Image (spheres, rainbow, N blue to C red):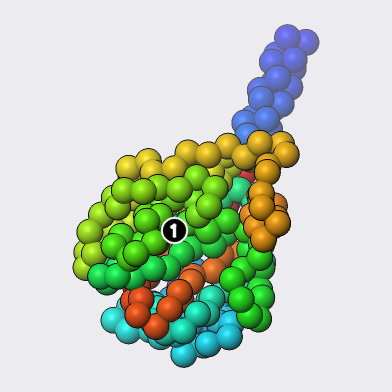
Amino acid sequence: MYFRLLGACVLVLASGMSAHAAERASQKQADQAWQPLFDGKTLDGWRASEAPGSFNVRDGAIVVRGPRSHLFYVGDVAGHDFRDFELQLDVMTKPGANSGVYFHTAWQEQGWPAKGYEVQVNNSQSDPKRTGGLYAVKDNFQAPVKDNVWFTLRVRVEGNRIRTFVDDKLIADYTQPEQPERPADMSGRVLSSGTFALQAHDPDSEVRYRNIKVRVLP
């Protein structure tokens, strides 16, 4: 009888542990689920700085064209404050276009964002820094794709490591040192946490973004 009771207790304990492990696994999977940041129809959840007219929605995409401005994500996902994450966007550049995707940044009414990293979006503009590079930190000087075609840009941040991919091809792989050296005008270009922003660089640049989604990493 004693051994039967002991076995039953062990079975109940094991079942409880198994259920707890399953619950943790389910929560981990939920944390890693992709969540949309753009509904394909409106700019709900986004806020533009100094020149809001530089951003419009057309044919399911955010069309970026106009004077310098930045479109910050201010929506509900993760309270628009991300640390470790994977961001994915479909992008199309027009000839001569220059843009960028910021992360770990924060709302700012005017100017180039002082906080966070910029992932360059530029396949043919005069600036030689090309798509997928971490602007002024780990640049890429070879365009990974052509203008006028949709491509997928993915940014993954885990701890001090940043990786960028274009159509699943690794472009930049950078691990930030404990004490990164930055020029005075880029002192905020370090890892912390924050939101995302899309850049309108100049009136001659047109870039389109769609299928913008993120998953928070544990």
Q: Residue 7 lies in what quarter of the image?
A: top right
* Residue drawn at the location 25% of the way across and 70% of the way down: 95
The reply to whether residue 7 is in sight is: yes
Q: Residue 194 lies in what quarter of the image?
A: bottom right
Q: Residue furthest bottom?
A: 53
Q: Nearer the viewer, residue 49 or 27?
A: 49
Q: Is residue 145 above or below residue 150?
A: above
Identity, as a three-letter code, of the amino acid under mark 1: Gln
Q: State the image coordinates of residue 4 (x, y, percent, origin top left).
A: 70, 14
Q: In the shown orientation, is residue 193 left or right of residue 156?
A: right
Q: Circle 1: is it few (<14), some (14-19), or many (20+) Cα within 10 Å?
A: many
Q: Residue 79 lies in what quarter of the image?
A: bottom right
Q: Residue furthest right?
A: 2
Quadrant of the image for the N terminus?
A: top right
Q: State the image coordinates of residue 99 (x, y, percent, origin top left).
A: 42, 68
Q: Which residue has dot 1 on it? A: 120
Quadrant of the image for the C terminus?
A: top right
* Residue drawn at the location 53% of the way across and 52% of the way down: 136
Q: State the image coordinates of residue 208 (x, y, percent, origin top left).
A: 34, 73
Q: Nearer the viewer, residue 11 or 151?
A: 151
Total numbered labels placed on residues in the image: 1
* Residue drawn at the location 66% of the way across and 75% of the way down: 108
* Residue drawn at the location 59% of the way across and 71% of the way down: 112
Helix or strand or loop: what does disc 1 sit on? strand
The reply to whether residue 25 is in sight is: no
Q: State the image coordinates of residue 193 (x, y, percent, origin top left).
A: 68, 56
Q: In the shown orientation, is residue 116 left or right of residue 206?
A: right
